[in-house]
Image (cartoon, rainbow, N blue to C red):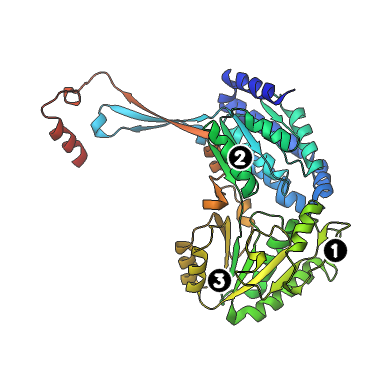
Amino acid sequence: MKISQVVEEQREFFRSGETLSYTFRDQQLEKLYTAVSMREKEIQEALHQDLNKSEQEAYMTEIGLVLAEISHMRKNLKSWMKVKVEEAPSAQFPSKTIQIKEPYGVVLVMAPWNYPFLLAMQPLVGAIAAGNCCVVKPASASQATSALIQELLSDTFEASYVAGVSGGEKNREELLDQKFDYIFFTGGAKAGRQVMKRAAENLTPLTLELGGKSPCIIEESADLSLAAKRIVFGKFINSGQTCVAPDYILVQSTVKRAFLHQMKKWIKKTWGEKPLDHPDYPKMIDEKAYDRVMGLLLGESVLLGGYGRKRTLQIAPTLLDGVTWASPIMQDEIFGPILPVLEFSSMDEVIHTLQEKDKPLALYLFTRNGKIKRKILKRLSYGGGCINDTLVHLSVPKLPFGGVGKSGIGNYHGRASFETFSHTKGILEKENWLDLPVRYLPSKCWKEWVLHKIMK
């Protein structure tokens, strides 16, 4: 079936009004939960084939998060859908205000390859909960997972309601030729700009989940061993191919040596002396990604790692020292298992430096100093993050997730997903039993009436 035909059939189905009720939406979320649960093993195998993800990593970072999102959505959806009625301002007496959450219509979800199942399914959950029809475009690079997503969606839903569209650049362009009511894109900044440009042609609202260089700050009061353990988890999971992975370390000079010792210890404890021989160590998505990341090591001072195995597309967990802001590796998001380490002397220096950089998608602060914590939270702008941990803010459905500035537009997860895929329709309902003549033109005492209402 042609893409244009899929979109038109979804538009016809949406116009029928069937997606609007709570019962319908809840039933579709239940169907999706069942479909994912029944295919758990197949999803794990596809993720292992694409990225060498272990069973634990696949469930913890993709499958489990999708199931948790559906459960959270079903638990709260009825209350989120309620029409909000309030008394109107006295200037409009007698009347009331009404706010109705309505779906946009036919929406497009475009997913990346690094978390190919999670980042296709999680936005879909929000689109379904908000009452939309949806076209899902999985990433072509993650071939096994994309094929499985196509099969799962076609077996679970009618294409006139939810459809998967596979393919590469050609299909992406054909999708963007269509008139959607909302676009949700996750990926790199370059592709995000192209999507935004195409969306502007039809004035289509959109969410962009991008990325950037997310800093990890180690203040001298931090628990260095625990900090290193949690950074190793957050950085090297999925071989660093995570949009919110710590991109670089900023460590206070007073504790740098001790911190680096802990980092080396925890990398070896986690992945062993020979990480590329560890059965659960993930790989780069393809040869192009492998070559790009390995090229970033040229001319850098390697503390640990710094080598790869092209045959398996694996790059060892790598620590770099002697890095400066002018270093080539500090110019763009790394998106691989390389962690540059920079040092600082004071927190004011860190704040001043980061305020001059693009706003990151995430920021991680390790400290036991409450004053420092409050200062960072107040002075620095970023999408979201953790204090004394990395990555795990993504697993909390109650927290909105999204970027700011060049790291993204809009957010989702939990209620934020429902809000993102909904339009709030505002209505003033006026009573008929009183009609004040002063509001009509011309009126001699309109000014006194308006001022009285404002000052009241």
Q: Which residue is drawn at 57% across and 33% down?
A: 182
Number of numbered labels in the structure image:
3
Q: Mark 3 points at which residue?
A: 367
- Of the numbered discs 2 and 1, the one sitting upstream in the chain is 2
Q: Going by the image, does 109 lie left or right of 455?
A: right
Element under disc 1: helix
The quadrant in which residue 69 appears is top right
Q: In which quarter of the image is the C terminus?
A: top left
**Separation of marks 1 and 3 at Cα, in angstroms:** 32 Å
**Separation of marks 2 and 1 at Cα, in angstroms:** 37 Å
- Of the numbered discs 2 and 3, the one sitting upstream in the chain is 2
**Separation of marks 2 and 3 at Cα, in angstroms:** 39 Å
Picture coordinates of residue 445, whole percent (x, y): 11, 29
Q: Residue 195 carries which label?
A: 2
Picture coordinates of residue 305, whole percent (x, y): 79, 70
Residue 75 visible in image = no
- Name above or below for residue 299 compared with residue 3: below
Picture coordinates of residue 124, whole percent (x, y): 64, 36
- Of the numbered discs 1 and 3, the one sitting upstream in the chain is 1
The quadrant in which residue 333 appears is bottom right
Q: Which amino acid does label 3 sit on?
A: Thr
Q: Residue at x 54, y 42 (%)?
A: 415
Q: Name the residue under label 1.
A: 276
Q: Which amino acid does label 1 sit on?
A: Leu
Picture coordinates of residue 110, whole percent (x, y): 66, 39
Dots 2 and 1: beta carbons under 8 Å? Answer: no
Element under disc 3: loop
